[in-house]
Every structure is written in C-alpha cells, then in structure tokens.
Image (cartoon, rainbow, N blue to C red):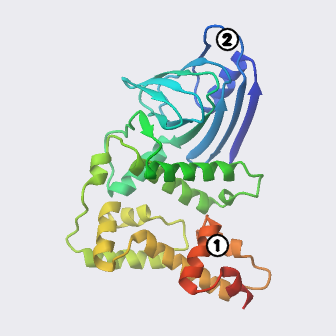
Amino acid sequence: MDAVTVRTDDVDQARAEVGKIFCPHRLTPQAGVRAVQLRMAAHRVGGVGVIDLDYGQEVRIQPPALESFYLVQIPRAGSTVVRHSGNTVISTPEVASVLSPHDPSDMRWSEGSPHRIFYADRRAVDRELTRLLGRPVDDPVRLDIGMVMTTPRAQAWARGVAFLADELAQPTDASLFDHPQVAARFEQGLIGQLLLAHRHSHSDLLAEPGHHTNPGRLVRRACTLIADHHGEALTVGDVAEALRVSVRTLQDCFRRELRTTPTAYLRACRLDAAHRSLRAAEPGVAVTTVALRHGFVHLGRFATEYRSRFGESPSATLRR
C-alpha cells in the first residue's frame, strides 16, 4: 500500500505535492487569497485509492485530461463548481463531481470545502466493465459528471469507500488489505458497484435483461467453478467472465434455476469452507485468520452470517 501525508501553506509546494498524486495542473488562489492551508492524506492499494484533500481557501484548479484514471470527488462541506467534458455541476456533500480520463477540467473549490476523493485506475474500470457485461467494449467509459449521493446504491458505495479509507489508514501489517487477495476482491467490488450505482456511457448495456439458451447448464457450470475456486480471489464478475456471459445473465439464471444469486451461492460456499476450517483448526488459530483466508473482509457480517447458517458463533465452533 502507498501512503502520503502533506501539510503546507505554500501555493507552489501544494501544487507540486498534489500534482505528484494526480497529475501536473494549474492551482490559482482566488481574489484576496495569498496562501493556502493544504491538508492532504492519500492512500492507494492496487487500482483504487482514497485521498482526503483540503486547500482551506478558495482556489481554482485546472487539470488537463487525467488520461489514466477516474476521480469521484465528494465535498464534506462547502461547494465546488466543476466544468468537465462540456458540462457543469455544482458539487456539494449531496452531489459528487466525477471526472473521466478523457477531457480537461476547470474547478473552483470554495473556502472550507474539504473533499474525499475516490481514485480508480482506468484499466481496472475497463476490466470490471468487461466482467459485468461478459464481453469487452471498444469505446471508453464516460461517467456522468454529477453523482447524486443520496440514493441507496450511492450510499452503499460510499460506505465501501469509507471502509476502504479506514483500512488504508491503518498502520503497516494492521490492515485487512495487507492480504493481496482481499484487496483485489474489494477493489473489484467497489468499482463494480460504482458502475452499477452511477450513470455512464454503458449503463444501458448493463441494464439489458440477461438471456441464455440453456440456463440450467450455465448454472451447473457456475456452481462447479465456484465450488472448485471459492478459496481464491473470486468474484461473481470473474465467474461470469470465465463462462463468457454477463453478470446480469448469470444473476438471472441463478434466480430462475436456484432462486438465489451467484453472490449468495459463493458466500455459502465460503461459509461452509470456513466452518470446516474452524472445526479442524489447531490450538491458537484465530477466527479472524480463518475469516480472511476465506474471503470475509467484514468480520462483523461474517459472524452474523455464520451464526445464521450454523446456529452458533465462529468462536463457539473454534472452541469445540
């Protein structure tokens, strides 16, 4: 994991330090402002990251096309006027601004508008869209400039970003994302949720109903793949990609054939595997170790789901 913390009141240093995290850009304090009060904490793992950024004063920021990454910028207070790709949005805590890699931007941050910024690598976004659709697309993903943060899907995504930020801020060897498979799985889920929660140039394709000529055979193949590989960094998108169908098609077939979802089936396989591991564990093995080994990042949720499935807590199984 990469981590950078910067505090400075010097405009030139602020421009240089922020430029190292994102890209070279113009930073102009607005009328009456001679110095900034930059406070920045940036953390990144794999293809995603979270940057908490506050200039403290009213500034104008003019980056060129980002080229290799996307940004979702969420003000925690104040407001920001963002012009990007021929559109303008007034961004507040209820409306995030979203920058795609293809066009320059012109932003005016008000005084007292600290932002939480989600960073996503362009290649990671392309890979996840391919998984969701079941096929690659030729044209780039262009996200709408304004993201309403008050919808249930957006709020769920924002909770994921908050969880990512908290874990990335932990000391070395103390974060769940120190485990590469856990970090990769969470990255895919967070980007996938963004593509489903926010409007973009391929949203209509994602919303198309899924059809398959032989849903029973598809589900049997998916169940076999999940049973054989549930201990790996496997996501539903990976399963769909391996079977050359879209995630929507896979989901529709699971509902039709098993009255469940691929996600629920994968989770059940992992719970069963964790149950077997806990029953066979040597003295000194921790529940957390077993949970992480089987892909459970949210330990509280793991304990709740485990109790629901087996009628006892993970620690009770471990003590037997």
- Disc 2 vs disc 1: which is toward the camera? 2
Residues 109 and 241: in front is 109
Q: Secondary structure at mark 2?
A: loop
* Residue reaching furthest to the right: 284
Q: Which residue is mark 2?
A: 33
Q: Which residue is mark 1?
A: 291
Whether residue 9 sits left or right of residue 218 in the image: it is: right
Residue displayed at 67% across by 84% down = 278
Residue 132 x %, y %? 37, 56
Few, some or many C-alpha atoms within 10 Å of disc 1 (few <14, some 14-19, many ≥20)? many
Image quadrant in which you'd find residue 134: bottom left
Whether residue 101 sits left or right of residue 275 in the image: it is: left
Residues 134 and 7: in front is 7
Residue 88 x %, y %? 41, 24
Q: Secondary structure at mark 1?
A: helix
Note whether residue 102 is visible.
yes
- From this view, report whether residue 245 is shown above or below residue 146: below
- From this view, report whether residue 151 is shown above or below residue 218: above
Residue displayed at 72% across by 20% down = 13
